[in-house]
Image (cartoon, rainbow, N blue to C red):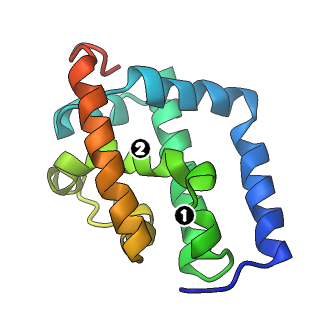
């Protein structure tokens, strides 16, 4: 997976950034980062299995975006070193930290052993990614404690 960043990588990063600025994506990201604080697989499932709701759309939009972006890295289309920089993929670490404590149970309940798999593989693929994830996991847990449990939807 290691690849020296190129001008094409920088262009792809800018295109990914533009996608994050789209109006509905901004709403989805805001919901993920200010309102959605699942504390269990069931909290996540409640939103994931509520098709047609705005929250379900936002859940899928953000998790799908980061899974797609991570797949670019896994398949060599984008430099991992560049992608893992906090300014580029910091939100991905937050998304993964929010589900990580109950990811095994979530995968079992959904019946998808690859759920969040591309994100996990990219994060865990380097020492930097693993260290950054440990840092973000602690930060997310501190934030989760401050949020009311009823704010999961």
Residue drawn at x 73%, y 48% as measured from the top left: 17
Residue drawn at x 28%, y 61% as measured from the top left: 112
Residue drawn at x 57%, y 74% as measured from the top left: 80
Q: How many marks?
A: 2
- Label 2: how many residues lie within 10 Å, few (<14), some (14-19) or many (20+)? some
Q: Nearer the viewer, residue 36 or 48?
A: 36
| Residue corresponding to mark 2 | 94
Residue 120 position (above or below residue 24): below
Would you say 12 lies left or right of 144 here?
A: right
Residue 80 position (above or below residue 43): below
Residue drawn at x 19%, y 32% as measured from the top left: 39
Residue 44 position (above or below residue 68): above
For label 1, the SS is loop
| Mark with earlier residue (2, 1) | 1
Residue 57 seen anywhere in this rendered image of the structure? yes
Can you give x and y, in whole percent of width and height, for residue 51 in the image?
Answer: 43, 30
């Amino acid at each position: 997976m290691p690849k020296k960043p190129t001008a094409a990588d920088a262009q792809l990063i800018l295109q990914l950034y533009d996608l994050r600025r789209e109006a509905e994506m901004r709403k989805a990201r805001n919901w993920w980062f200010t309102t959605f604080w699942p504390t269990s697989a069931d909290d996540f499932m409640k939103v994931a299995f509520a098709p047609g709701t705005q929250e379900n759309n936002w859940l899928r939009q953000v998790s799908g975006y980061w899974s797609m972006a991570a797949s670019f890295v896994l398949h060599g289309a984008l430099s991992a070193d560049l992608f893992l920089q906090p300014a580029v993929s910091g939100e991905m670490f937050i998304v993964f930290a929010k589900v990580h404590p109950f990811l095994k149970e979530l995968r079992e309940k959904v019946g998808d052993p690859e759920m969040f798999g591309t994100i996990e593989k990219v994060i865990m693929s380097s020492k930097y990614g693993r260290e950054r994830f440990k840092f973000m996991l602690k930060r997310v847990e501190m934030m989760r404690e401050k949020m009311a449990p009823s704010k999961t939807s």
